Amino acid sequence: MNNLVKFFRSAIAGPLAALIIAVILISLTTDRFLTTQNLINVSLQVSTVAIAAIGSTLVILTADIDLSPGSAAALTTCVLAILVKNMQIPLPLGILLVLVMGIGLGFINGFISSYGRIPSFVATLATMSMYRGLAFLITEGHPIFSISPNLEQIFYGKLLGIPLPFIYMLVLYAAAAIFLRRTRSGRAIYAVGGNESAAHLSGIHVKRTRLLAFILAGLAAAIAGTLMSARLNSGSPNYGVGLELAAIAAAVIGGASLAGGSGNVVSTLFGALTVAVVQNGLNLNAVPAAWQNLTLGAIIVLAVGVDMWRGDIGKNLSRIFSFRKGDENPGRQRTAS
Amino acid sequence: MKNTKPPLWELREISKAFPGVQALDKVSVSIFAGEILALVGENGSGKSTLAKCLAGVHQPESGELIHQGEPVEFAHPFEARERGVATIYQEFSLVPTLSVAENIFLGRYVVKSKLTGIDWEMMRQQTSEILNTLSIQFDPDEVVRDLSVAEQQLIEITKAMSVDSTLLIMDEPTAALGLAETRQLHELILRLADQGQAILYISHRLDEIFQIADRITVLKDGRCIDTQPASSLEMMEVVRMMIGFDIGQHYPKEINVTSETCLEVDHISTETGVNDVSFDIKVGEVFGLGGMVGAGRTEIANALFGLDRLTEGSIKLYGEPIQLSNPADAIHAGIGLVPENRKEDGLFFNFNGSLNITLSRLSSILKWGFLNLTQEHQTGKYYFEKLNITSSGLERSAQFLSGGNQQKVVIARWLFSQAKLLIFDEPTQGVDIGAKIEVYRVINDLTSQGYSVILISSDYLELLAMSDRIAIVRDGKILQISPAKELTEYELLSIASGAEGNGNG
């Protein structure tokens, strides 16, 4: 019982509740939602954004922001296509190389913002433009199709009936959750985002920590990019447009604070799932794309708003219903533990 | 004399309390037009609070403010401005990216008409006029960011003077200024007084005050000790009044000094102003750094904690030379810093109590390379019990702990990090008396267990009572090191403030 209360007060409860409400509402509007095929579709759709959102969460936790994942993912698809199709490099090696490149792209982001002391918003706004520019440059603007017959298996394969991308996603989320909760570097990320000055005075290497978050975000973007090329067996400089915003939205809906130091990847996963489920529901109900964008915006405001206003709403309710007298609700306090 | 005229402002029996402190207790002061009245007292004596009551920032609980015979009440600083009270605080209120003229007219731009908008020409002209009357040479179009601190200070004054003011309040205006700049400021102040301005000048630098003040009011513990013409006072008398004679507070000092050397600091200097400083600290010793705010005490601490690079000199800990290029090096070597601003520099509000403590040495709670959260919780619990910290803080954000308990969480972090030398920068500032005594007990416990302590405090009684030896710091230098027992507060204050070197003013 005590654990149950603790759970509902924890940071995960809100985003999970949002997801459950979305699922219930959508199943009420259409009976095509809760079908195996549709759920597979949703899981395929969500995986790319959700994996990129791991990176966004790590960066947001250190009170930085990364605007480059969409471009980094596009560059990844193009480089993979060139390596494997044009240069005839074996697919596994090609994938390994683009993942290393993702780390490099993240390093550039982190180095410019952390050591170059350029605000991360500006630094990654610049690299967002540069990475996509590079993707256009190396492909001369043309998509590259039919990279490798084996590539599609990475996306469309299944394990025990579960689509592989969904499994990658779960594994990566588990790894990220353990990293954040149970490693020194993970703790350092929370410390830097919570109070940079105190972190410095506690012996945390602040710059190194911020750099690490960007590097991991670069890796996450490259994994997302690899999945994109596997999905269509192609590479294109036009892929991944808006991926960074979808990823940031997932983190924010999951309750990560842009001020840094609070949030966790499990909540981000629920955030990403909520967005995917709502979009899927709107698709199933044949709602036009324009309305879907409006809805996504509304979800962001609502999710963050409910979080911010919780304390006030609680207080006002208790004022209205006097039987809750004396029950003070100071709003959600998140800790990393 | 001026005193035959009725006063411009009369403050009658002003009282003001804050939670836990009686900041002002029936203070009465008069201020006359054309005079410079200096307000002196130790830190926390109520100088700034009195100024803020007059500026409308604080509302006194009892007593009267009388402006030219008429009682007034201020609900807001604007109302004080309307009565001609202009205030210059320690922090500037200038917008660095705007020009001098724009800053001076900020918030009250002169509008020509709705169509043509702001009348820049008029504002520039008026700025020049004001600058001229104050005999300050400035281009009204100069951007404030490009000016020196002293010049910004002058702009700040100009801004205050540009609204018709009759009383100018200055709170430690020279804190950030060098000698030449201070002189420039003083010339301006004297000129303003000649023009009939009343000036309330707050400073703890007695040498300055004796150079410019007409009368001196001494505050101590929120009470007005005396107001006298500067010419009839001697600097040493003022020092005596500031201290008072009732040194009645009790400090539970234990002496745990051993003969073993903990830290040797050999002729260190930094770019931040530490100038050829040498001292050594014994194991179990409390080494006090005394001096005025801004004298260089914190800078010495920063150098020892790897925050500021040494330009010269060396540091040895337990006989081993140590290189400190960042706090991590200092922590690794066995040094911990309890910072002055525990909220900004000490605590993580996104962490509960345990996590706040273990951060300094996460390597010791690793199991198979991962953090052992059970062990972490037990560690937190151990230190919470050891330092007697409210146990609710173990599970909740450190935000909800009281000031004293927050301080102890930061101390616990260094106990856990296995520090051997702890630097306390103003450890009892803003904590209540009970928590203060707890901090003193912690210091005693630490020294008895072989820790060494550097204590920086502006509370001289505390510094004298809790230190074994005291180094007096001024202008980044150590002027003298003496056993705390052989030093009186009177000597400490007069050396630290520079009163001694200047004789009787």
Image: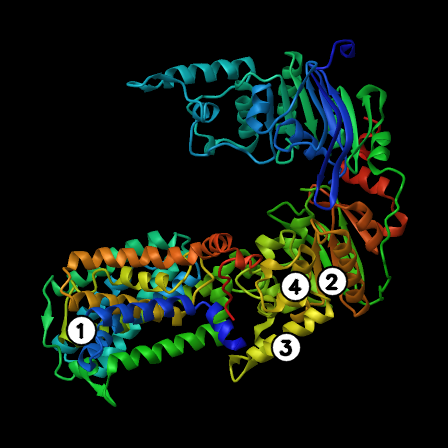
Looking at this view, is B351 or A284 the one in front? Answer: A284
Q: Identity of the amino acid at label 2?
A: Leu
Q: Earlier in the sequence, mark 4 or mark 3?
A: 3
Looking at this view, is A24 or A92 the one in front? Answer: A24
Looking at this view, is B312 or A164 the one in front? Answer: A164
The alpha-carbon separation of the residues under discs 3 and 1 comes to 48 Å
Left or right: where A129 falls relative to A210? left
Looking at this view, is A51 or B143 the one in front? Answer: A51
Asked if disc 3 and disc 1 are in contact, CB closer than 8 Å, the reply is no
Say the numbered circle drawn on residue B409: 4
Q: Give the labeled residue for mark 2.
A: B263
Q: Dot 4: few (<14), some (14–19), or many (≥20) neighbours within 10 Å? A: many
The alpha-carbon separation of the residues under discs 4 and 3 comes to 15 Å
Q: Identity of the amino acid at label 3?
A: Gln
Tag 2, which chain? B
Left or right: where A178 falls relative to B66? left
